[in-house]
Amino acid sequence: MTVDTRSAVEDVLAGLDDDQRAAVLAPRGPVCILAGAGTGKTRAITHRIAHGVLTGTTAPQHVLAVTFTARAAGEMRGRLRGLGAEGVQARTFHAAALRQLRYFAPRVFSGKALPDLVDSKARLVGQAAARSRLRLDRTGVRDCTSEIEWAKSAMIEPAEYAAAAAKAARDVPIAPEQLAELYAGYEQVKRKMGVIDFEDLLRATVWAIEEHRDVADQIRAQYRHFVVDEYQDVNPLQQRLLDAWLGGRDDLCVVGDASQTIYSFTGATASYLIGFQRRYQRSTMVRLERDYRSTPQVVALANEVIAAASGVEAGVRLKLTGQRPPGPSPRSANFPDEPAEAVAVAARCRELIGSGTPASEIAVLFRTNAQSAAYETALADAKVPYVVRGVERFFERPEVREAMVLLRGAARAIEPGQPLAEAIAETLSAVGFRVGDPPSGGSAREKWEALAALVRLGEDFAAAHEGANLSTFTDELAERAAVQHAPTVDGVTLASLHAAKGLEWDAVFLVGLAEGTMPITFAKTPAQLEEERRLLYVGITRAREHLWLSWSSSRSPGGRASRRPSRFLPESAGGAGSGGARPGSKAAGTKSGPKSLPICRICGVALFDPAQRKLRRCGGCPSDYDEGLFGRMREWRALLAKEQKLPAYVIFTDATLIAVAEQMPASEQQLASIPGVGPRKLTLYGDAVLALVAGADPLSLTAPTTPDDDA
Ligand code: ATP
Ligand code: MG
């Protein structure tokens, strides 16, 4: 080894912690790195490859590193080059399969070249639908196409589809038997045209290797060491290809985080990652738990959210420890409506940019693409540049463009005096839109949401402009579309949580964290709900320093405040009954009197929700509780719980303490009017609580009460 190589090897090992180094130095053979978010997974595997290459134990041309997106593969190649490991193949499964099959095609397709790849799967599905007289609109075709992709990725044939879909609790866009027929029809159309799709490409590569000894020998002689990043995202078809490449050998290093499994709906499964050790008995297991990306504050919240997870993925969950210096606490905020939430986010973005955070280091992440519209508008209004990643810009969506053409046409014909929102909804009914009647999921739902967003824009516009009509509204839309079309290079990222995977920013805004959106309404089974929780976890772990979590109580201004915060938000982040704290607001709270009608003490609406009744405040009104008092009461409760060996919630729940902190009872009678404070608790703890409200130190209050025996 030359002096130069020796120092390159030292460089590869420097800047790794002990666990990362163990992963890099693990002997050849099966290695499984179970690593949490931000723990340096890509770092560990690229350094492992580079170490093998630089020390001469592996020849670069014998390594095949695979991952799932072209961006991730490019990132890997870049890092490998930077480490001095040239000549290693780092590709997506598809790119690797395409390269191999193209090479072997003449041999396995009797002298013919590889068939062309389908350019638009949906178009062929549409043709198959027409042949079997199935009436599907564009979104219906898109949803059926996704379903066919799922089946093919799971290696499910048309005849097996209906049973498999039922078993997997798929949300099938049409009757399962019809889908099976459509799937069979699509395969026929494809064969007739002499083209193949992406899944066929993987299947054909598997077949070429499994059924052709010479192909298998040649591929296996070429590739001897395999590395897979984001292994929790592998689907059965890709796994089959990986097995074909390996051909019973075991020089395989996989990296993954089961808690970040968010593509199950496309057929991916963490079961291969979780079952790795069972499959390879003599494998080296490495766990990476040090988070180098996020502050301890962000890491603590991420841990808290994922600690509540259940299911197989949770069985291998890792508890992260933050390595960065402390930063600001995550902020949680509740707003009366979505536009108010978006305006506040835009204002905070401006503030961050003003204090030196580059716009490109900020991201606003949401659950469904349709949510981006409100943020595009608010950021444009606040003159904050933004880029939309992985989703079409609102005004570039086909359904929005089509709607704008319709609205412009209707502007000439509509009766004067008709309320604007009504006129919009009536016009959009021509494309199948029904107010208050959203379809259950998939792109049909996204289309509905986009059109509903247009109706809301109309409502807002009418509220702000006297005499607004379809004509002035379409002018307004055209103007907004023009502003948003303007290309931006450096801006705040707007992205769905799915598209944010693997990325990181200094500041991250997680918005729309209300029940119905997070988890999304169409997540119904326990497994689907767990995937939603993981999605929130992925979102939280994208933030290096600033994290914001918000939700709004109603969709539009003046709407009924019927929404509740996401069940996944811990109390510390404004969830589970606390109603969420509005940052910086201190509304004038009225002290509570004797027991009265359950109405919001701030706005007076009737309260039906038990948690809101306890607070005597609706979800739409700002919380005005005294945080200092709440903190002292919690401290007192903790001391008392310890002393009396009781769980803390048996003394008082957090919701009751918040109600006390909000209502600041000055007498025993006022305290007794707070739900959760019954006669027994009044006797046991009444004096202490009133003393705390009056300013007493928790330490001076423990020990005077003893639990009675009737507990
Ligand atoms: P994700 O699960 O989100 O994909 P990951 O495990 O792939 O995350 P990386 O993106 O590789 O994590 O690393 C996260 C961040 O931590 C990067 O900015 C990386 O440079 C940094 N990092 C990783 N390991 C170390 C280390 N030992 N010392 C300092 N920084 C590190
Ligand atoms: Mg990564």
Image (cartoon, rainbow, N blue to C red):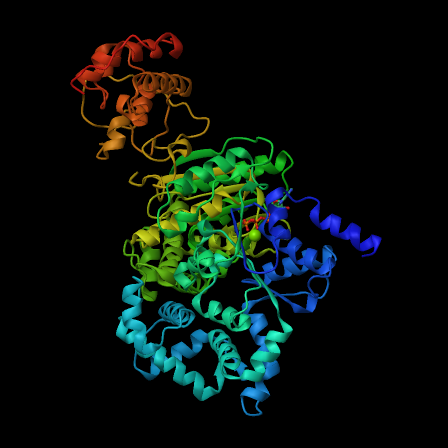
Residue 276 place in picture, x, y as percent: 47, 58
Front-most of residues 437 and 41:
41
Residue 80 place in picture, x, y as percent: 69, 58
How many marks the image carries: the answer is 0
Residue 417 appearing in the image = no
Determine which quarter of the picture holds residue 27: bottom right
Determine which quarter of the picture holds residue 121: bottom left
Q: Residue at x 35, y 59 (%)?
A: 445
Quadrant for the C terminus in the image: top left
As drawn, the residue found furthest toward the left would be 710
Quadrant for the N terminus in the image: bottom right
Residue 513, above or below 32 = above
* Left or right: 393, with 649 as reference point: right
Front-most of residues 210 and 474:
210
As drawn, the residue found furthest toward the bottom would be 110
Residue 54, above or below 147 = above
* Left or right: 423, with 200 as reference point: left
Residue 7 place in picture, x, y as percent: 79, 50
Q: Residue at x 47, y 54 (%)?
A: 498
* Left or right: 334, with 329 as reference point: left
Determine which quarter of the picture holds residue 434: bottom left
Residue 63 appearing in the image = yes
Residue 683, above or below 446 = above
Q: Residue at x 50, y 42 (%)?
A: 509
Residue 176, above or below 34 = below
As drawn, the residue found furthest toward the front would be 282
* Left or right: 218, with 121 as reference point: right
Residue 123 place in picture, x, y as percent: 44, 77
Q: Residue at x 41, y 84 (%)?
A: 189
